[in-house]
């Protein structure tokens, strides 16, 4: 069960409902796993066509059975926007500007009630769908409360919860009122075990449980790996080839610094562009010889914080380009379309991949990039990304707040000798390809006692 | 030694330099102690007259010997604004909007160099001024680095450091680059011991030292107490009586909710006004019958964040007043003049004192208020204030982010019966008056081994 399913529906011109890959990082990570199991997928209907598909009864699409929930739209938005995204996401990624956020006013408390209701809807749907003794894999922070109901009302089920974000440190859990913290942690510890992408988040969660509940939770660490077969298929597609040609035309024989991200405050886009600006200032020899390709697509734009952040990003890019551009050379190329073939084409072409989040559950791009890249590109990776625990011995580390050091790391990466690049790329590829989605799934099943 | 001295100088009309009480919370807390000792005070010259006084040689003013430093103005502003106030203050109070701050670019690193230089100036001045075996009490986050020089170059001195702010949690120390964190903590642990207002900050500091330096530091806990004799003198002054009359005229027989604070993001002014707005909305019976007196004076206005926060505060107050005001009743009275007699007059008059910081080293107002108040007023105190560890058993606790609960606490306080108010006020007074500045000084001297 997850908030979004791996497929979403559209009404085609002939009136039939057809399934398509869903949006969102989680959905794309889970999609290849879904087709490999005999599972039922419980998720919220996102689009109108999803709702219509749900109304037409159980759905079997491409080998996956779906059960779409159709919660009240207003209550769903309150739960999803206010609690899941504007509260829990912000808490787990340390994004609160605490002088102003969170503001736990009556409106927030009403949204918290909605979050409870939506979680209850999901729990009921799963209890209806799950045969006796079934294994239930609950995904992410949208569904933190379902565990308690499942445990009390369906003790036969083997349930685990997996968190794809970081988990907040114990000191930050105190930002939430005690009863809310307690309810969230009780919901999570009601499962057989709680999984995370790295031991750092598992330890933060355990610390919260000790502080708030006085108990030691059962946790497991199961980093997700990229769906490399799926990505290679995309890489061999005609769309990807076309996107690659367009990119080649744009950058020519210049070096390419690449980032592929949602436009998301936790991804630290601003400091990445500032570091590039600093590079062009301090190293004039790079002017005209390097392009920063930023494949960064909008996300959660109905949240004011995200809309504001996008404006800041675009303004900063415009300033940097205005400062340094010459005829025939635009320093930063901003591509804000969410287009998988285009992202894959860029990942095969980079010389330097910049992944500098201020905090990140895992960061799958840091694994996908090296496996797709064909130029022995260099991976610059934030120590605050979950993937650092797997890639840290091979990647070049970044302190995400340190613009000067990030700029220096760009210079190091751009000037690395051929042999060093090859050794670096080989080590990063080995670490990035060590696990795939099936390993991650197997770990969850094992933690549920169903392995 | 402290950044600001307890006295500042002005050139009087006859051309003489005369000393006056200095601005800032630390200076006013230390002033009564200064006159009771045979100490030399080392501080930075803040005003032009301070610099002139410094140039005229050692100063003896009102029984205190001063040694003013006159550092380069540009370097001083970089150290004071960029590092002490915009970095260390923000770090210790969890005020960073991490998607945007801190931005450790070359300008920041230059300021960090300046912070080192200014700390070095202070260390040199103390080494010149201190006789063999002298005790040196170093105050606050502006002077985190002096300890290492004092220890190496003057091992005869007995030095302690006292932090008046909170101390950042270990997870937050990682926001700073490793070398900076290490330098700060090495500077602090070079003293015989490091003091804090509450064990919570001492433990946070110890956790940082374990994580970054791998050592267990020596700490002590010594909460400051109010200078109640000094405050009572002010309370009996003609200025205070006049201010009291003006206030009485303004509020009449209405209930008074009071806050006395710098306009400072950590003080949580916005959520305080939102809670009051919520009270007026949900409890119509209070409309016209209660006045929120906010004695909140500007601070650090040359920092953009502070200027922006002040605008937000004023706009919110205007909105609340516009929403609820009636002829003859202004719901929130904003007094932005930093005027001690006026603050004292308000503290004697409140029915409810709201102290709701998101994080605070101690909060002296929470102790001063109950000792001055003459109406068995109720103290609402944030659990995130250092003073909570002393006053928590007596005060009504607040979760600073929870606007709904803060509003409910205002209602509870306003409707408390006479007997309960008397019992509450007696308990709060006893806790607030348990220690004075001399106890705090004695604890520091004992920690220095000079007790």
Image (cartoon, coloured by chain):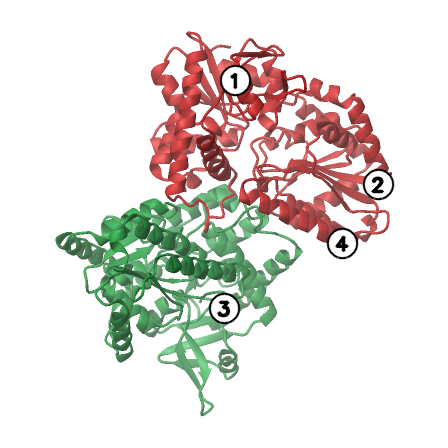
Chain colours: A green, B red
User: Which residue occupies the foreground of this view, B275 or A416?
Assistant: A416
The residue mark sitting in front, 1 or 3, is 1
Q: Which residue, given by chain and number where applicable, does mark 1 sit on? A: B54
- Asked whether the residues under marks 2 and 3 belong to the same chain, the reply is no
Element under disc 2: loop
In the image, residue B433 above or below residue A271: above
Q: Which residue, given by chain and number where applicable, does mark 4 sit on? A: B322
Q: Are marks 1 and 3 in contact (CB under 8 Å)?
A: no
Q: In which chain is the residue bearing label 2? A: B
Where in the figure is residue A47, as x and y percent of width and height? 50, 76
User: Which residue occupies the foreground of this view, A35 or B285?
Assistant: B285
Where in the figure is residue A353, as x and y percent of width and height? 28, 58
User: Which residue occupies the foreground of this view, B339 or B189?
Assistant: B339
Mark earlier in primary sequence (2, 1): 1
Disc sitting over residue A127 in the figure: 3
C-alpha gap between disc 2 and disc 4:
19 Å
C-alpha gap between disc 1 and disc 3:
78 Å
Element under disc 4: helix
C-alpha gap between disc 2 and disc 3:
57 Å
Quarter of the image where the C terminus of chain A is located: bottom left
Quarter of the image where the N terminus of chain A is located: bottom left
Element under disc 1: helix
In the image, residue A259 above or below residue A57: above
C-alpha gap between disc 4 and disc 1:
50 Å
Q: In which chain is the residue bearing label 3? A: A
- Asked whether the residues under marks 2 and 4 belong to the same chain, the reply is yes
Whether residue B252 is visible: yes
- Asked whether the residues under marks 3 and 4 belong to the same chain, the reply is no
Q: Which residue, given by chain and number where applicable, does mark 2 sit on? A: B254
Disc sitting over residue B318 in the figure: none
């Amino acid at each position: 069960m997850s908030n979004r399913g791996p497929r979403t529906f559209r009404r085609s011109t002939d009136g039939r409902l057809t399934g398509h890959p869903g949006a969102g990082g989680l959905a794309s990570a889970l999609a290849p796993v879904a087709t490999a199991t005999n599972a039922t997928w419980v998720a919220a209907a996102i689009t109108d066509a999803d709702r219509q598909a749900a109304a037409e009864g159980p759905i079997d699409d491409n080998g996956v059975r779906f059960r779409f929930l159709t919660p009240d739209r207003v209550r769903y938005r309150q739960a999803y926007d206010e609690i899941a995204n504007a509260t829990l996401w912000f808490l787990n990624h340390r994004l609160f500007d605490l002088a102003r956020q969170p503001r736990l006013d009556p409106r927030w408390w009403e949204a918290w009630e909605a979050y409870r209701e939506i979680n209850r809807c999901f729990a009921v749907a799963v209890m209806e769908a799950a045969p006796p003794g079934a294994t239930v894999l609950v995904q992410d922070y949208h569904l933190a409360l379902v565990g308690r109901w499942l445990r009390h009302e369906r003790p036969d089920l083997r349930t685990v919860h997996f968190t794809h974000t970081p988990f907040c440190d114990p000191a930050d859990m105190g930002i939430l009122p005690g009863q809310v913290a307690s309810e969230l942690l009780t919901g999570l510890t009601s499962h057989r075990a709680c999984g995370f992408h790295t031991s750092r988040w598992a330890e933060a969660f355990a610390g919260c449980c000790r502080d708030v509940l006085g108990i030691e939770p059962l946790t497991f660490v199961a980093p997700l790996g990229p769906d490399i077969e799926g990505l290679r298929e995309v890489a061999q597609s005609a769309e990807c080839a076309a996107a690659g040609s367009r990119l080649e035309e744009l950058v020519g024989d210049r070096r390419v610094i690449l980032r592929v991200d949602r436009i998301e405050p936790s991804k630290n886009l601003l400091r990445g562009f500032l570091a590039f600006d600093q590079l062009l200032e301090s190293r004039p020899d790079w002017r005209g010889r390097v392009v920063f390709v930023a494949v960064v697509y909008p996300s959660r734009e109905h949240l004011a914080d995200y809309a504001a952040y996008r404006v800041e990003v675009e303004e900063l890019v415009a300033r940097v380009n205005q400062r340094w551009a010459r005829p025939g050379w635009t320093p930063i190329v901003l591509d804000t379309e969410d287009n998988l073939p285009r992202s894959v084409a860029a990942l095969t072409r980079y010389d330097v991949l910049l992944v500098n989040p201020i905090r990140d559950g895992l960061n799958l791009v840091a694994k996908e990039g090296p496996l797709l890249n064909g130029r022995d590109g260099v991976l610059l990776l934030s120590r605050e990304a979950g993937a650092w625990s797997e890639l840290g011995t091979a990647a070049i580390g970044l302190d995400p707040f340190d613009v000067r050091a990030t700029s220096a790391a760009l210079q190091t990466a751009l000037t690395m000798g051929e042999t060093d690049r090859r050794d670096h790329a080989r080590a990063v590829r080995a670490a990035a390809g060590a696990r795939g989605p099936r390993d991650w799934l197997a770990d969850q099943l094992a933690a549920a006692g169903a392995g």
